[in-house]
Amino acid sequence: MPDSSDTSPPPHPFLRWTVIAIAVTVLALAFAYVAGWLTPQRLTPQRMVSDLQTNSGLYPGFRRNHAKGVCVAGYFEGNGAASAYSTASVFEKARTPVIGRFSIPGGNPYAPDGGTPVRALGLRFNLPNGQQWRTAMINTPVFIVSTPAAFNQLTVATRPDPATGKPDPARAGAFFASHPETAAFLGWAKTNKPSASFATDRYDALNAFYFVDTHGQQHAVRWRFEPEAKDEAGAGPKADDNDYLSQDLRQRLATTPQRWHLLVTLAAPGDPTNDATKMWPADRTTIDAGTLVIESEQAQDNAPCRDINFDPTILPAGIVISDDPLLPARSAAYADSYLRRTREEARLPGVAHADTPKPETK
Ligand code: HEM
């Protein structure tokens, strides 16, 4: 029942409109802050990806890093050895289907394979319970920097000079001098020639993760895939051949599936989980958890790996991320790159889409 004794007048319409206006303004400011409009200097995933894009130039429909690559498919045969440390079903004695992508770094999908010694592998394991494990790895023993801010500073410091098409050595040198943590990676890059085959490289996740066992106990780990193929001695990229890596892979897979062993290293107390520039000592316990078998390859423009975001934070139950600050930054940057490239795909001639009718042949 309304209280008939309340004779106070209704609030003035001006007051009501003021309250609504304040609420709308606060909401708009919150959106603007999250979008980075109020703090243009703040490092956002969009800025990280735009800076990568500025370095390489814009190649619509392609990844803003690791743009050149090839799709692969196969399976992982777990052997049960890692099941004591993680409940993820992928480690049981079972076969899990895998979609993957080999790549080289940089935003130019037409870059020469011999232009960098870095090779990369992204994998997506489809577990039977609908969960997925995604990982994106490179063939170096450490990463070049340990924080997202340093990664962005590196991107800007190594931006090609429009006059020479190459990074300004003074600018790049100043960055490396002020970031001594880059020394281990640079030492590796100096002494390792570009390999002649994706099949003979090892691929290392570099970031630390935790395996979670049946008791809920966490174990800090790093993983890598070690190749069975070791036939690189004497082989080398042909100077005149831009795309030898995909040709080599096609030739090998035409006759023989290629195999890698998943090696999982367990940290000892005190080993850093938040710094991908630091290796763990070589004597740490390492488990061979099973074999990755790659059976087939396909050009990336129209194969399943094209529309996969190999976000390393997408993990099945039994694996969780560590405190490594690169991991959330990678997740956010890959998502932004993914949104840009998949939006552009719709406008690319020759790229098939489920919703694009096939052009009529005359
Ligand atoms: C803050 C640091 C990093 C940033 C901002 C960054 C950025 C990116 C971006 C924007 C992409 C393209 C994603 C897509 O469109 O799907 C990419 C791909 C990739 N990145 Fe990173 N990255 C970082 C660190 C790393 C590290 C530490 C590794 C290796 C352990 C790595 C390995 C890869 C690989 C293998 C791919 C290609 C995956 C694929 O085939 O789709 N990145 N990165």
Image (cartoon, rainbow, N blue to C red):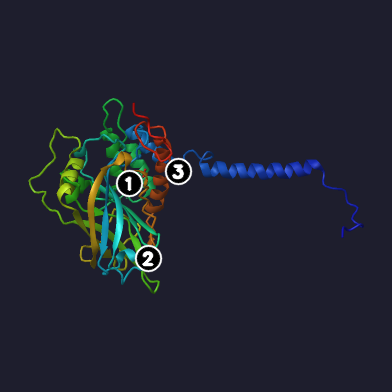
Quarter where residue 275 is shown:
bottom left
Residue 3 horizontal/vertical position (percent): 89, 58
Residue 286 horizontal/vertical position (percent): 23, 66
Q: Residue at x 39, y 39 (%)?
A: 353
Q: Do tag 2 and tag 3 residues touch (Cβ < 8 Å)?
A: no
Location of mark 1 (residue) = 305
Q: Classify residue 345 as left or right of residue 186.
A: right
Earlier in the chain: of badge 2 and badge 3, it is 3
What is the CA distance from the residue labelled 2 to the residue labelled 3? 30 Å
Q: Nearer the viewer, residue 341 or 217?
A: 341
Q: Quadrant of the C terminus?
A: top left
Q: For the residue marked with disc 3, what is the amino acid?
A: Thr
SS for tag 1? helix
Location of mark 2 (residue) = 318
Q: Quadrant of the N terminus?
A: bottom right
SS for tag 2? loop
Quarter where residue 49 is shown:
top left
Q: For the residue marked with disc 2, what is the amino acid?
A: Gly
Residue 7 horizontal/vertical position (percent): 91, 53
Location of mark 3 (residue) = 44
Q: Classify residue 344 as left or right of residue 90.
A: right
Q: Classify residue 224 as left or right of residue 50.
A: left
Work out whether residue 8 can be spotted.
Answer: yes
